[in-house]
């Protein structure tokens, strides 16, 4: 099993925050209710961070083989 480095985890969280901020801005522009806006931002943050970390680990595993 490949373990992520602290840098990979940190960068995944940063990219997740950027995605969440972009989506929250779009939701705010469309006058989405505050509770839904926060829920959408948290969901996007979790999904974007997980996807980015998974892609980073996959790239690293392909370089090894």
Image: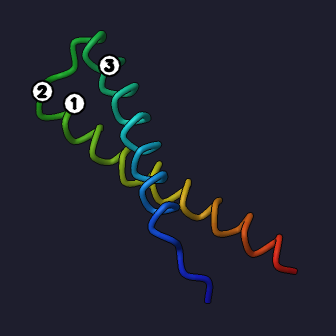
Q: Is residue 34 left or right of residue 37?
A: left
Q: Secondary structure at mark 3?
A: helix
Pinpoint residue 13: horizontal percent, then vertical percent: 40, 51
Q: Nearer the viewer, mark 3 or mark 2?
A: 3
Pinpoint residue 8: horizontal percent, then vertical percent: 52, 61
Which labelled disc corresponds to residue 37?
A: 1
Q: Earlier in the sequence, mark 3 or mark 2?
A: 3
Which labelled disc corresponds to residue 11?
A: none
Q: Secondary structure at mark 2?
A: helix
Task: Look at mark 2 in the image and give the residue it sits on.
Answer: 34
Task: Look at mark 3 in the image and give the residue it sits on.
Answer: 25
Q: Nearer the viewer, mark 3 or mark 1?
A: 3
**Is 49 located above or below residue 27 in the figure?**
below
State which quadrant residue 25 falls in: top left
Q: Secondary structure at mark 1?
A: helix
Q: Residue at x 51, y 71 (%)?
A: 5
Q: Earlier in the sequence, mark 3 or mark 1?
A: 3
Q: Residue at x 65, y 59 (%)?
A: 55
Asked if the residue at tag 2 contacts the one at tag 3, i.e. Cβ–Cβ closer than 8 Å, the answer is no
> Label 3 neighbourhood size at 10 Å, few (<14), some (14-19), many (20+)?
some
Pinpoint residue 1: horizontal percent, then vertical percent: 61, 89
Which quarter shows the C terminus? bottom right
Asked if the residue at tag 1 contacts the one at tag 3, i.e. Cβ–Cβ closer than 8 Å, the answer is no
């Amino acid at each position: 099993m490949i373990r992520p480095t602290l840098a990979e985890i940190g960068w995944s969280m940063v990219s997740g925050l950027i995605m969440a901020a972009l989506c929250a801005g779009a939701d705010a522009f469309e006058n989405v209710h505050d509770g839904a806006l926060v829920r959408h931002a948290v969901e996007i943050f979790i999904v974007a961070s997980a996807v980015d970390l998974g892609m980073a680990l996959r790239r690293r595993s392909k370089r090894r083989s």
